[in-house]
Image (spheres, grey):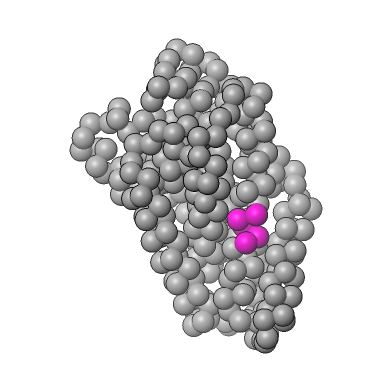
């Protein structure tokens, strides 16, 4: 395929993914807005008023960047895992694999679809947060880059989960037993400075720590980890996830029957 045909194939896949989650927006976009509103009320207004300041900001201002990032992570991940496993379940992915479309275009189409849902939900949640607090932007470049990198990374993670899943129960195992604990222990609701030295060092093994703190730096200008290290770790995880996802597509492992 020449570059124009590849571009057409990519846009076709991307439009399919966007139409899919927009068609069921009450299941894909609305729940995040409702859930985050409850987080803002409970952790920001009710509990936050008793906690006081954290990192030099009110508790509400401190948790908002983490909650926005949590919405991006979960939506980017869940969009790709559900969409690609659905294609695998009804065997339509086999037709895609035998087509002339390069595998990296197929992977890029699904990843961009998941990332676009993550970005759209991030905008919705950010607008909702304005009803509860003033949202400032310390460094717009860092905010944009970290959102793009994070949504791409977790869209790729969702793709890998979809390839290995054997049934619809399997696509909920990783989000429930792996992703959710990593999010809640990733510094969304607290500063790493509150942890004992041992547990603070253990937390640095959690990739969500770098994602949340880098985004918090872009919004508030504070971070518990070095921004350079955070970008480096997220870029490393993204490259590894892309290479492994492409390897799975190229070999057809668990895809061709």
Q: Is residue 5 above or below residue 14?
A: below
Percent x, y of residue 172:
54, 53
Q: Quadrant of the N terminus?
A: bottom right
Please state the total of marks drawn on the protein image.
Answer: 0
Residue at the top extreme of this rendering: 50
For the question of whether residue 242 can be seen, the reply is: yes
Tell me if 209 is positioned left or right of 5 in this view. left
Q: Is residue 31 above or below residue 247?
A: above
Residue at the image position 37 percent from the left and 45 percent from the top: 227
Comparing 56 with 62, the one in front is 56
Q: Is residue 160 above or below residue 43?
A: below
Magenta stretch containing residue 119, yes or no? no
The magenta stretch is 112-116
Percent x, y of residue 201:
24, 42
Percent x, y of residue 163:
53, 69
Comparing 36 with 217, the one in front is 217
Locate residue 135: give its quadrant. Answer: top right
Magenta stretch containing residue 113, yes or no? yes
- Magenta span: chief secondary structure: helix
Residue at the image position 37 percent from the left and 55 percent from the top: 233
For the question of whether residue 89 can be seen, the reply is: no
Comparing 150 with 48, the one in front is 150
Q: Quadrant of the C terminus?
A: bottom right
Locate residue 209: give its quadrant. Answer: top left
Residue at the image position 25 percent from the left and 37 percent from the top: 199
Percent x, y of residue 130:
64, 27
Locate residue 6: give its quadrant. Answer: bottom right
């Amino acid at each position: 395929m020449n570059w124009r045909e590849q571009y057409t194939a990519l846009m076709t896949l991307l439009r399919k993914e966007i139409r899919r989650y927009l068609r069921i927006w009450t299941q894909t976009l609305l729940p995040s807005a409702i859930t985050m509103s409850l987080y803002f009320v409970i952790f920001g207004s009710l509990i936050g008023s008793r906690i006081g300041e954290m990192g030099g900001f009110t508790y509400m201002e401190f948790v908002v960047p983490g909650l926005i990032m949590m919405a991006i992570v979960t939506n980017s991940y869940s969009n790709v895992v559900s969409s690609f496993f659905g294609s695998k379940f009804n065997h339509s992915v086999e037709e895609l694999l035998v087509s002339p479309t390069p595998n990296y275009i197929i992977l890029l189409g699904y990843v961009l679809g998941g990332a676009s849902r993550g970005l759209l939900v991030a905008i919705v949640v950010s607008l909702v947060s304005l009803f509860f607090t003033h949202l400032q932007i310390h460094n717009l470049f860092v905010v944009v880059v970290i959102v793009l990198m994070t949504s791409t990374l977790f869209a790729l993670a969702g793709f890998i989960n979809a390839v290995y899943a054997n049934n619809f129960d399997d696509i909920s195992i990783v989000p429930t037993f792996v992703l959710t604990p990593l999010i809640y222990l990733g510094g969304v609701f607290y500063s790493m400075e509150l942890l004992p030295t041992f547990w603070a060092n253990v937390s640095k093994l959690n990739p969500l720590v770098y994602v949340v703190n880098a985004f918090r730096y872009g919004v508030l200008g504070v971070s518990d980890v070095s921004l350079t290290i955070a970008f480096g770790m997220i870029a490393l995880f993204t490259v590894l996830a892309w290479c492994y996802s492409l390897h799975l597509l190229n070999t057809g492992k668990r895809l061709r029957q």
